[in-house]
Image (cartoon, helix red, strand yellow):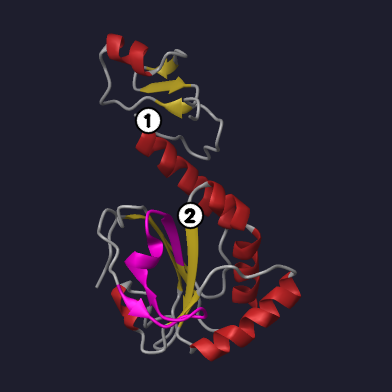
Amino acid sequence: MSLRLGDTAPDFEQDSSIGRIRFHEWAGDSWVVLFSHPADFTPVCTTELGLTAKLKSEFDKRNVKAIALSVDPAEKHVDWIKDIEETQQTVVGFPILADADKTVATLYDMIHPEQSETMTVRSLFVIDPKKKVRLIITYPMSTGRNFDEVLRVIDALQLTDKYTVATPGNWRDGDDVIIPLSIQDEAVIKQKYPKGYTAPKPYLRLTPQPDKQ
């Protein structure tokens, strides 16, 4: 099964480091970052889970829950978490799915045979409160993820869901945003974008980011 943006994230029930999880029920009304790892007790994964744990306050501000996955059993996850917490000097406050039967890995197409027949690649999904897949990033096994980018995209998704804007390349929270080409009526533009705009080209109209409410 190959997931695409806008698809409903498949529901599942699976073991984890904190017990059995029914995914949609666990997610509730939160955004979710679901990300997979090739295996427990591996160096790149250890740093990634440590980074995720340290970002808890940033995820909380954005109403985001994190949940990791590997195809190792739950008891290994529990032991690995001790290593993560010791070496990364943090507390792992999110579950790690124990996908030993590869149920979730199959649903989310996390095993790429040309990389490994048995282990998951570094897949990452951002899922919104309506359970829609909003972002898919896949890294090779040897390359750790950039979690600053994950937060940046979540900021952009949440902003563009709330306001009729788009974000330019390398946008960060607080930067100018783009007025979509679908908005052409000047009266509507004045109402929607009261801070005004600049237009280096007729199709490129930049306006200050709307105030957060």
Q: Any magenta on residue 30?
A: yes
The residue that label 2 is drawn on is 64
Left/right of residue 204 with respect to residue 174 in the rendered view: left
The residue tagged 1 is 163
Tell me which residue sits at (34%, 29%) in the image.
164
Residue in view at x 29 percent, y 9 percent: 187
The location of residue 20, given as percent across then percent down, is: 41, 80
Residue 77 % position (x, y): 56, 84
- Counting residues from the N terminus, which is met first, the one under dot 1 or under dot 2? 2
Disc 1 residue type?
Tyr
**SS class, disc 2:** strand
Helix, strand or loop at mark 1: loop
Q: Does the magenta stretch include residue 143?
A: no
**Residue at (53, 84) in percent of width and height:** 39
Q: In this rendering, is residue 81 above or below 49?
A: below
Which amino acid type is shown beneath numbered disc 2?
A: Val
Q: In which quarter of the image is residue 110?
A: bottom left
Mark 1 neighbour density, 10 Å: few (under 14) some (14–19) many (20 or more) = few
Residue 144 lies in quadrant = bottom right
Q: Which residue is drawn at 57% across and 57% down?
A: 147
Residue 177, given in percent of the width and then of the height, sits at 46, 28
Q: Give the range drawn in magenta.
A: 12-34
Q: Is residue 41 left or right of residue 189?
A: right
Residue 42 visible to the viewer:
no
